[in-house]
Amino acid sequence: RLYRLRPNGTLDIVVDNIPSPNGLALAPDQQSLLLAVTRDNAVWRVPLDADGTAFKVGVYLRLNGGAGPDGLAMAADGSVAVAHVGNGTVWLFDARGEPVGRLDTDGRFSSNVAFAPGGQDLYVTEAETGRVLRCATGRAGLALYAHA
C-alpha cells in the first residue's frame, strides 16, 4: 500500500494491492509520484488530484532481470535515477521515461539512490559490497523538503 499522512494526522490509503512497493519520488511539479514496485519490476506513475487522490495509476517504466527497482531519486528536470536491486545497476531515465544513462555498481544489490543537496552527484548504496558510490550525472537533484 501507498499511504498519505495529512497535516491533521489522518492516514489515507492512496493505492492498494501493490506487489512490494518500495522507493518513492515526488515529481518536480508535485502533480504525481513515481513508485518503485519491486515485484512487478516496474516504476509506477501515480497522478494526484488537487486533494491528493490518485487516479489513472499505471506503469511508467518496465525493467527486466534482477529483483526489480528499489530506491528512486528525482532530478529537478524530471529525470529519475532508479536503483535496480539484484541487477547491480542504477538507471537514469529522462522525464519522458527514456533511458539516458546506466551505472554498473560492481555488486548485485544497488538499493538506494540520492542526489547531493544542491549538486549533480548521485550517491548509491551497494548492499552486497557495503559501499557507497558517487556518480556525476550532469543533472541537478530535486531539492528535498528537508533541504529546502
Image: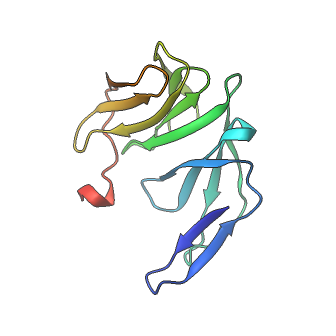
In this rendering, the answer to whether 54 lies above or below 116 is below
In this rendering, the answer to whether 34 lies above or below 81 is below
Q: Residue furthest top?
A: 106
Q: Quadrant of the C terminus?
A: bottom left
Residue 141 x %, y %: 33, 41
Give the quadrant of residue 1: bottom right
Residue 58 x %, y %: 72, 51
Residue 82 x %, y %: 52, 34
User: What residue is drawn where x is 47% and y is 53%?
Assistant: 27
Q: In this orientation, which residue lies closer to the viewer: 55 or 39? A: 39
Q: Residue furthest right?
A: 17
Position of 3 with respect to 16 (left or right) is: left
| Residue 111 visible to an observer of this rendering | yes
User: What residue is drawn where x is 46% and y is 37%?
Assistant: 112
User: What residue is drawn where x is 67% and y is 24%?
Assistant: 66
Give the quadrant of residue 70: top right
Q: Residue furthest bottom?
A: 8
| Residue 96 visible to an observer of this rendering | no
